[in-house]
């Protein structure tokens, strides 16, 4: 019987995961044996058995995905780690490449690109999807783009407002504001709001926004 590449997935987007599972299982070259919706579930199970390739999202509900990936690479050097995420920021991609992930694919990628990525990393290569390659080619000098809502929320973060206070100002739910805050952290490659505010002040981003 032909050997199938053993895949595990750690991602809390359940509908997307089901689609991934169906796609991979129907490929004839790989099979999803386990799915985790939290970092803690994944970490505990990997102590017992590792897959050939782990598909991991960066944004998880119970921990820092970057630190988690770094730990996995150190603890299980034989396991291939393929990041599958919505994060398309240069700072995030560059950081993940620096810590040694074997591949980086956006969730907007095609099925064929995903299967190509799995095959590539399984056989010892490094895979960056075409969209990711374009981001890296533009380089760090590329200005981080923000939507008007992100601009406004960053301004209010720099003024020291809480998520609840920001939600009242921009007429969004608290959870939505929390999501925007996490996205801003990812875009600028910082770990917390203190670092985000410091960067915004240092780079003059706050002054630009205040003067709008």
Image: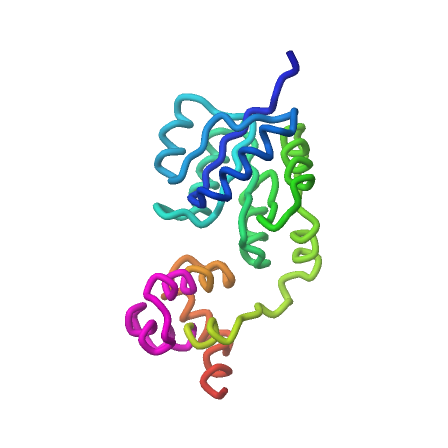
- How many numbered discs sit on the rendered protein? 0
| Place of residue 138 in the rendered image (x, y in percent of width and height, measured from the top left) | 69, 61
Residue displayed at 32% across by 68% down: 163
Which residue is at the front of the view, 168 or 118? 168
What's the residue at 58%, 28% (across, down)?
A: 25
Q: Is residue 36 left or right of residue 161?
A: right
The residue sitting at the top extreme is 1
94 shown above or below 1? below
How did the renderer colour the structure? rainbow
In the rendered image, residue 178 lying in the magenta stretch gets the answer yes
User: Residue 112 at what x, y percent from top left?
Assistant: 69, 39
Image point 38% across, 40% down: which residue?
Answer: 38
Residue 170 belongs to magenta span: yes
Q: Which quarter of the image is occupied by the N terminus? A: top right
Q: Main secondary structure of the magenta part?
A: helix
Image spot of residue 67 (x, y percent): 43, 45
Write down the region rendered in magenta. 154-181
């Amino acid at each position: 019987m032909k050997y199938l590449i053993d895949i595990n997935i750690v991602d809390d987007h359940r509908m997307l995961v089901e689609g991934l599972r169906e796609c991979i299982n129907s490929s004839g070259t790989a099979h999803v044996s386990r799915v985790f919706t939290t970092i803690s579930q994944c970490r505990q199970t990997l102590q017992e058995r590792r897959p050939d390739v782990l598909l991991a999202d960066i944004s998880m509900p119970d921990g820092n995905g970057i630190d988690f990936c770094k730990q996995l690479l150190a603890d299980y050097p034989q396991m291939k780690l393929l990041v599958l995420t919505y994060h398309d920021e240069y700072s995030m991609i560059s950081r993940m490449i620096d810590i040694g992930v074997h591949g980086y694919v956006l969730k907007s990628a095609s099925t064929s690109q995903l299967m190509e990525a799995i095959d590539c990393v399984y056989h010892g290569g490094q895979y960056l999807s075409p969209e990711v390659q374009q981001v890296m080619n533009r380089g760090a000098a590329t200005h981080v783009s923000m939507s008007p809502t992100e601009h406004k929320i960053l301004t209010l973060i720099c003024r020291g407002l809480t998520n609840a206070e920001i939600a009242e100002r921009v007429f969004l739910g608290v959870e939505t504001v929390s999501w925007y805050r996490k996205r801003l952290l990812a875009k600028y490659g910082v770990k917390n709001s203190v670092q985000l505010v410091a960067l915004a002040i240092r780079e003059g981003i706050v002054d630009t926004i205040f003067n709008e």
